[in-house]
Structure formats: structure tokens, C-alpha cells
Image (cartoon, helix red, strand yellow):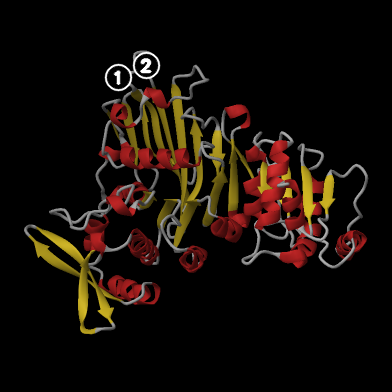
Amino acid sequence: MSKYTEIVILCEDLQQGVFARTFLIKCGIIRQRIRIVPLPAQGGGEGFVRKQFPLEVQAYRRMMNKKNIGLVVMIDADTRSVGDRFSELNQALLESGMDLRKPDDRIGIYVPKRNIETWIYYLKG
Amino acid sequence: MLNRLYIDNYKCLVNFDVKPDNLSLFLGDNGSGKSTVFDVLSKLQTFIGGNGKVDQIFESSDLCRWQTSKIQSFELNIESPNLGGEFLYRLTIEFTESGEKNRVREEQLLFQGEPLFEFKMGEIQLYRDDRSAGPKYPFDWSSSGLASIFPRNENKLLTWFKDQVQKMFIVHLIPPVMEEETGEHGETSLLKMGENFVSWYYSISQDQGLVNRLTNVLRDVIEGFDSFKFEPYGKRYLLLTRFYSENSSNVLSYRFSELSDGQRMLIVLYALLETAREGNYIYCLDEPENFISLPEIQPWINALQDVCYENRSQAILISHHPELIDLLASHSFWFERPNGLSTRLYQLPQASEKDLRVSELIARRWIDHE
């Protein structure tokens, strides 16, 4: 049971997942230790990320003291502000009766603004 | 029903004890010992059925590699609702240093804690159904003494146990190796990969009620399916499957081997299911969902579950499929080999609606059983 998933990526669509996975591999995370949360058909969209977020935080917190793990969340800003997206995710936790993200939680939230295509365009020069 | 199986010193199974329910699911990583449990059941079935001597069935290479003991032990607890009691079968094999002349150290059958049969130090002691002592005589240490006992009026309990062991189906079905014709004689047991399915089906097809039930259910499951037909083929029979055709008023016949892997798998799975309704069968099915399409998995599992809960038969499944795992997680045993050594069994914790699916936790290796 040593080869477990270390980083879970919760994202809106496959494109975000590929971006985050490639970035993590470049950072030295072993490919087999990364898992993208299975997406609904046609991609999940920001609604999927918000709905799934509390489940993933709960699963992370149950396991955080037993395994070396982290959660990467990607949600496009679209027409909203970065702060709005953080507030929405916080609200999802509160509605599930869960504590908000704490400084020592290894949960990273990334909000591409306006969206991931901009980043891919930028990184390709 | 198989209430308990104990295995000691067989491959990765050391002091291993499992108590399956009517319907159980074995889960775990590759190499965690799930299929090894089925291997043991299959060897015990062969041995008790008198289909081989100790040396032909139990090999010294199957002894646990990190143990020095040359003694291998097995126990089977099988309950009979009709007889109102539980059988306990014990077998201890002693291996020699040379790996030859391995022998039965002890073989014993008890019913409700009282002996029906004992084979120790090369001597058999029989007991009658009323528990009175029967004959005592020397016997070959290299074979199952139990297998040598013929059915008699005074050993109906012992005979029931032997018959029940032969009513275990221990299979890992592989459609591409299934033959399309019968052997020259029908066969009452199904081989591990279902190679002889057609022969086996030929035997059970003498039961017209079963054939009707199977035909009806397959009409719902397989698009266009009409019926089966056995066609003479020398001294054998070919199994033909007949399908309705939208473009023809005739029924079209296909050889069993012409069907897709998935269609053949469905036919075998539903044939097993309909046999299970006859009662008192024990099914050990290794990855039964292989080859079949996703929409077909749950209906078959639900039907199997119904049969098992009505106490007609018992099923123990091995699977890595998320659909099956999430359906049967509450009936599962988690197999794990800490540090790559002996298999240990764990119960999965109860999940709530706020938890991730068990299959997702397994995919992450985040199973928390402590």
C-alpha cells in the first residue's frame, strides 16, 4: 500500500487536468502518484468543482495524518473575480458543515483568470 | 454454505481465516492473495473428489516461502440448513525435504463437533451417522481417505458433505477458450475458464424448467436472442444460438464460438445464475464482470444478490470493477499483504453519503481500515 495517490487534482475539464498534471510532474511528483478526479461527461464545469470540493476536502482530512498527500483545485475565474471563486468554495464547505481551509491544509486552489487557455497561450510563448 | 475457510502455509496465506457471507466480495491489490483462496478451494475440491493424489494436487513449491514448516493445513466449515448443522473438514499435508512422497498427516470430518471420519497415521476410522464407531482399517497415506468412502445408508452425512464440495463452481471465465461443441459425454462440472461450458450446459439442459428460465432471461438480456439448439456433430453436439432477424422471417443460427466474447460471457453467467436457483451451490467467481458491457453488470449482480439472499446459493466474487465494488462494498473483505508478506484481511469502514465512493478510495490506495 505504499504507492498511493499523493496529489489529487480536482478540476473543471480535461484541459485543466492535463495542465495541472504536467505542472506537477515538472515539479518532481511521480506520474503514478497523481490522480485527476473523474470528470462527468462533457466536462464538469465550475459547478462540478464546487459540488465535489467538500467531498475531496473531507477525504483529504481523513487521510492527511496517515499519508503524505495534497489536493490541487482548479476553477476558472470566467467572468468572476478570484475572490468570488474563493468565497464560493468556502461557502460550499460551510454548507457541508466543514471547517474552512486552514493554513496547514495542503490544499492549493488555483483560479486561472480568465481561463486556462490564457495560461497555455502565455507559456507557449 | 461455506461458513469458514482456514488456510495455513500455502503461498501467501499463513494462519488465514475467512468467514464469507451469502454474498461476499474479495477486494485488494494484484498479488494480495484473493485468487489464491480460490486455488485452495479448487485443490480441496479435487482432492476430496478423489481426482488426484497428494503429490498431484499439492506441491511443495506452494509452501509459504518465508516459513520453514513443511506442514500445510486447511479447514472448511460448511453448513447444511437442511441437516441443521455444520461440517468441519480438516486436512493436514506433510511435505518431505525431497518434495517426494508427501502425505496426508491428518484428514478429518466432523458434524456438529462429532467425528464422522478420521484418517491419521495411515489408518481410517469411520463413524456412522448415529456417531457410533464403524470400521477401522489401514489406507494409503498419499490419497484422500474421505474420497475413498462409498455412499451407504449409515454415512449419509458424510456423503452429503462430499456432494456439497463438488457443488462448488470455482471459475475465472475466459470466453475465447470456450469450446463450441460437447465432449462425447456430458460433464457435470464446469472447468476453471469455462472451456467445457457447452458440455456442461448439455448436461444441465436435461432440466427443461431450467432451460426455459434461461431462454426467457436471455431474450431480455441479449438483443434478438431466441433459443439454443444442439445439433449432432459426429458423436458430439454443436451448440447453436438462434437469433431473430429484422430483415428475415427466419431465425438465424450461429455457432456458440461465433458469438462475441461478451455474449458468451452473458450466457455463461446467466446459466450459472439459473443453476443457482436450484439451491445449495457455492460460486467462487473471479472477475465475473470481465468482457461484459457496463449496463449488463448491475442487473446480473442484482439477480445474483436476490438468489443469495433467498439462501438458495452462495457467491464469493473477486473484482476490480468500480460498478461491482460500489454495489457490494458493504459485503467486502479487503486483502492486503503488509511488507509483501502474509495476507491479512480487513473490513472496510462504513461509508456515509459525504464520503467518496469506495472504488475511488481504492483507486487512490486510500483505504482506511485501521
**Dot 1: within a 10 Å radius of its alpha carbon, few (fewer than 14), some, or many (20 or more) residues?**
some
Label 1 amino acid? Answer: Lys
User: Is residue A54 in sight in this rendering?
Assistant: yes
Distance of mark 2 from mark 1, alpha carbons? Answer: 7 Å
The chain letter for the residue carrying disc 1 is B
Q: Is residue B216 above or below residue B27?
A: below
Q: Which residue is mark 1?
A: B101
Q: Position of residue B161 (x, y in %)?
A: 37, 48
Q: Residues within 10 Å of mark 2 (few under 14, many from 20)?
A: few
Q: Secondary structure at mark 2?
A: loop
Q: Earlier in the sequence, mark 2 or mark 1?
A: 2
Residue B211's x, y, as percent? 28, 71
The answer to whether residue A36 is visible is: no
**Residue farthest to the bottom, as pictured:** B249
Residue at the spot x=66%, y=60% of the render?
A39
Disc 2 marks which residue? B96
Quadrant location of the C terminus of chain B in the rendered image: top right
Q: Nearer the viewer, residue B101 or B355?
A: B355
Q: Amino acid type of disc 2?
A: Thr
Residue at the outermost left position: B234
Q: Which mark is residue B258?
A: none
Say whether residue B194 is left or right of residue B15. Answer: left
> Dot 2 falls on which chain?
B
Residue B195, given in percent of the width and then of the height, sits at 27, 51
- Are the residues at dot 2 and dot 1 in contact (C-beta closer than 8 Å)? yes
Q: Residue furthest front?
A: A125
Q: Foreground: B222 or B149? A: B222
Can you say whether A91 is above or below B79 in the image?
below
Q: Residue at x 24, y 62 (%)?
A: B258
